[in-house]
Image (tube, rainbow, N blue to C red):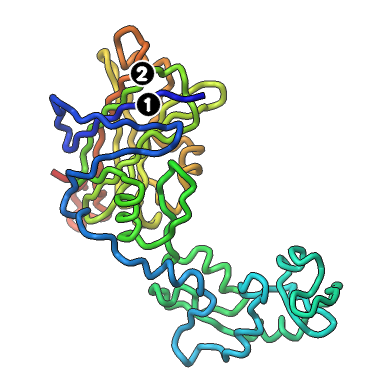
Amino acid sequence: MELDSIECVSTVGGEEDEDPEIRNLHHSGLHIHHPLSHHSPQFAASKPSNPIATNIGTATNIVGPAAVAPATSVHDLLECPVCTNSMYPPIHQCHNGHTLCSTCKTRVHNRCPTCRQELGDIRCLALEKVAESLELPCKYYSLGCPEIFPYYSKLKHEALCNFRPYTCPYAGSECSVVGDIPFLVSHLRDDHKVDMHTGCTFNHRYVKSNPREVENATWMLTVFHCFGQYFCLHFEAFQLGMAPVYMAFLRFMGDEADARSYSYSLEVGGNGRKLTWEGTPRSIRDSHRKVRDSHDGLIIQRNMALFFSGGDRKELKLRVTGRIWKEQQNNPDGGVCIPNLCS
């Protein structure tokens, strides 16, 4: 079923535009068309190169100082010949001594990829012992991580390493691009055509001609630059049980520890009523779906949204306003902490 389009008008700094520019967001195709003619200087630079993209493919070859770098031959022995990832117990071998990881053993249908002999259930205990004696730097060493770990602890650390690359926060498609924050900001602007704004207050109007048809779809993503950081504002429609709802929430382009330094508020209303939400932005380390499914944001039931829209309730017209501020962590003078608001 072909879905109608939603029109979105964005203004920054809380000022309403008398002649707003209309953007058509076709959420059936999950492609957002945004004009790029009015970018702030912070977003005008050309896309930076992404050193992470080239490092990820060879992450197992990233080593630290020579004093802790393993001998190349040992490192090669611990590399699975099928997936080229580092092998962890159980490490399997064929009768001729060729090894591979347990994951790839099922993929090759129990046949050695080197000599084609049947693998059986032989474990290479000697290689497992060798791996146990190694200490290696994190594979994100070249991205700034200084840590060194025993071989079998390294994998657990790398899954949570603060220097690991971020995944593209765009929710309108399954984007697999990874990189650091400057690269992802340029990627969102150039490849996903996301609107970019400078300032910590916002004023968006969302218009939909047929609000009775609600599909799981992303309607809007806008990136804000303030306090030297980047924030992603999401607005979308989806089914919550049997009820269609609209939801707005903010994500921080950085780690969770840094995200806790900021707060934001959202407000939607009409006909003399309003709903407000205040919270802490979630890190983009948490996937868009995880944040949405946790209901961590401003949720508007469809009937309430239509009430806010006014008129004959046949057209959705929502105005969502909000602001972002930085929390004061400590006050050495013992006085009242006042949020650092962006003008």
The answer to whether residue 341 shows anywhere in this view is no
- Within 10 Å of disc 1 (Cα), the crowding (few <14, some 14-19, many 20+) is some
> Which quadrant of the view contains residue 313?
top left
Q: Residue 153 in the image: x percent, y percent?
A: 59, 73
329 to the left or right of 154: left
29 to the left or right of 117: left
290 to the left or right of 23: right
Q: Residue 157 in the image: x percent, y percent?
A: 53, 69
Give the mark nearest the N terminus, 2 or 1: 1
Does 262 sit above or below residue 47?
above
The residue sitting at 48% across, 82% down in the picture is: 63
Q: Which mark is residue 209?
A: 2
Q: Which mark is residue 152?
A: none
331 to the left or right of 304: left
Q: Real-space Cα distance between discs 2 and 1?
A: 8 Å
Is label 1 in a helix, a strand or a loop?
loop
Does 44 sit above or below residue 221?
below
Which of 265/128 is in front?
Answer: 128
Which residue is the extreme one toward the top? Answer: 312
The residue sitting at 45% across, 65% down in the picture is: 164
Q: Residue 22 in the image: x percent, y percent?
A: 24, 29
Amino acid of disc 1: Ser
Q: Residue 247 in the image: x percent, y percent?
A: 40, 31
> Which quadrant of the view contains residue 338?
top left
Number of labels in the image equals 2
Image quadrant where one finds the C terminus: top left
The residue sitting at 23% across, 44% down in the picture is: 36
- Within 10 Å of disc 2 (Cα), the crowding (few <14, some 14-19, many 20+) is some
Amino acid of disc 2: Ser
- Mark 2 vs 1: CB contact within 8 A: yes
Is label 2 in a helix, a strand or a loop?
loop
Q: Quickly name the residue at label 1.
A: 5
